């Protein structure tokens, strides 16, 4: 299952039923779980781990040095790709900048062709990056998020679970869970289609609608408004509480505002 032209470094840990394509390079200390499929011309740098049943397609480079001018290349760090995740062609995932830490891609993720995950990023379970999506360093992506084709996220941005960033959009501000965002750092509404497909019940969606309207329907500090709504005891669903807590949690970028409605001429 390992092509004769593949180069396997010292101390590489290979699980069972692994396949490695032609001219791929696994550097010293790489870890590969059971049932992993590695295409041709793949490069796995030292410190990279591909967990069980992962797929890495041709010309992907996992574990490359961070694009950080202050980074010391002698520092030991790595990348962990969660089980059952798929890495398509030309994807790059850079290792962490902090000694002993990892850039982490969760289980069941899909990184489509040409997408980039910067150093120290954390992606939750079942996150999707469409073609050529770009994540700066220290970006945190929640479970079941979708980042559209050609979209980009500034370093240290947070994206809550089940959020969507539209194709060719960009955000330098945090995007709350269960929302849709587009343009430049603008929230446009709740991800209602995604919530329905994920099986959220009507009562939960109703609470999220009320929370969204309250948070984005009036002026004032997000944190204080969210704290007051949580203390009211009115919202019982875990999703509504998580939505409100997102506005209270520490942020280094700030929270994206709502996009003003566009008036269309007749």
Image (cartoon, rainbow, N blue to C red):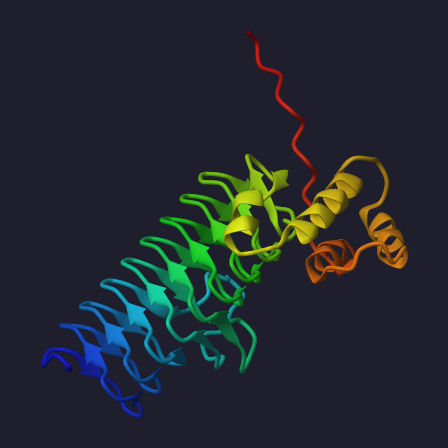
- Residue 252 to residue 46: above or below: above
The answer to which of 105 and 234 lies nearer the viewer is: 234
The answer to which of 78 and 35 lies nearer the viewer is: 35
Q: If the image is split into quadrants, where does the C terminus sit? A: top right
Q: Residue at x 53, y 82 (%)?
A: 100
Q: Where in the figure is residue 68, as x and y percent of width and height?
A: 50, 62
Residue 29 in view of the camera: yes
Residue projecting furthest to the top = 266
- Residue 234 to residue 219: above or below: below
Q: Where in the figure is residue 244, as x and y percent of width and height?
A: 76, 54
Drawn side of residue 78 relative to residue 6, left or right: right
Q: Residue at x 61, y 57 (%)?
A: 156
Residue projecting furthest to the left = 4
Residue 150, picture quadrant: top left
Q: Residue at x 90, y 55 (%)?
A: 232
- Residue 207 to residue 102: above or below: above
Q: If the image is split into quadrants, where does the N terminus sit? A: bottom left
Residue projecting furthest to the front = 202
Q: How many numbered discs, if any?
A: 0
- Residue 217 to residue 108: above or below: above
Residue 254 in view of the camera: no
The answer to which of 100 and 104 lies nearer the viewer is: 104
The answer to which of 200 and 132 lies nearer the viewer is: 200
Q: Where in the figure is residue 57, as x and y percent of width and height?
A: 25, 64
Q: Where in the figure is residue 260, as x and y percent of width and height?
A: 67, 27
Q: Residue at x 48, y 49 (%)?
A: 147
């Amino acid at each position: 299952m390992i092509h004769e032209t593949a180069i396997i470094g010292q101390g590489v840990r290979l699980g069972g039923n692994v396949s490695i394509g032609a001219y791929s390079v696994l550097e010293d200390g790489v870890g590969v779980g059971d049932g992993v499929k590695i295409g041709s011309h793949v490069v796995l740098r030292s410190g990279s781990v591909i967990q069980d049943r992962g797929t890495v397609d041709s010309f992907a480079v996992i574990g490359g040095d961070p694009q950080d001018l202050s980074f010391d290349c002698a520092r030991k760090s790595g990348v962990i790709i969660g089980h059952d995740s798929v890495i398509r062609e030309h994807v790059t995932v850079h290792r962490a900048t902090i000694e002993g830490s990892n850039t982490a891609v969760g289980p069941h993720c899909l990184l489509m062709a040409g997408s980039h995950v910067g150093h120290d990023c954390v992606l939750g379970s079942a996150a999707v990056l469409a073609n050529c999506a770009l994540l700066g360093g220290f970006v945190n992506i929640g479970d079941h998020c979708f980042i559209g084709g050609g979209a980009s996220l500034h370093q240290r941005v947070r994206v809550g679970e089940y959020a969507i960033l539209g194709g060719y959009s960009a955000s330098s501000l945090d995007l709350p869970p269960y929302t849709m965002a587009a343009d430049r750092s603008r929230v446009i509404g709740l991800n209602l289609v995604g919530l329905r497909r994920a099986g959220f019940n009507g009562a939960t969606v109703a609470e999220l609608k009320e929370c969204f309207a309250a948070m984005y329907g009036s002026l004032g500090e997000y944190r204080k408004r969210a704290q007051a709504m949580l203390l009211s005891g009115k919202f019982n669903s875990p999703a509504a509480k998580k939505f409100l807590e997102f506005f209270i949690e520490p942020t280094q970028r700030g929270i994206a505002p709502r996009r003003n409605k566009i008036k269309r001429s007749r």
